[in-house]
Amino acid sequence: MKRVRTVTHRGTEIVIIDFSSMKPGPELQVVIEQGRVAIHEHELNSVLTLVDVSESEFDAEMIEALRVFARENKPFVKASAVVGSTGIYDMAREAIQKTSGRHFVPFSNRERALDWLAKQTE
């Protein structure tokens, strides 16, 4: 399955960036670059994103890479949801939010996140 893809949910286009079950390493940079391309092909303040970090392993380098990714995408993103950000991962999400100027609304599953994102165009 592709880690970066665009889906239509309830008539709304959403970019899904799937970091689930990912460990620090070169694959992270590949997914980040694919995500950057998918997001930057849209108009400013128009992209809805769902980021899935379920069962990922974070280290300082991965958190920094995600922070830079989030900051670079800020002008393009209208709203973001995150799935899998629980426990210790909440601290990583909060650190990324503070240092990137972005806000990620946490959800327990993808369906709820997609439903919420679809409503952000109303």
Image: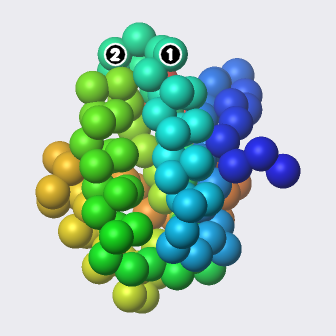
CA gap, disc 1 and disc 2 = 9 Å
Graded by Cα atoms within 10 Å as few (under 14), some (14 to 19) or many (20 or more), the crowding at tag 2 reads: some
Question: Which residue is at 56% across, 61% downward?
Answer: 26
Using the rendered view, name the quadrant where residue 25 is placed: bottom right
Q: Whole-percent x and y of residue 39? A: 49, 27
Direction front: furthest residue: 26
Amino acid type, callout 1: Glu
Name the residue carrying label 2: 44
Which image quadrant is residue 40 in?
top left
Q: Residue furthest top?
A: 43
Residue 55: image x %, image y %? 62, 79
In the rendered image, is residue 115 in sight?
A: no
Q: Residue at x 37, y 57 (%)?
A: 66
Q: Nearer the viewer, mark 1 or mark 2?
A: 1
Q: Is residue 77 visible?
A: yes
Residue 41 is labelled as 1
- Residue that protrudes farthest toward the bottom in the picture: 87
Q: Is residue 2 left or right of residue 110?
A: right
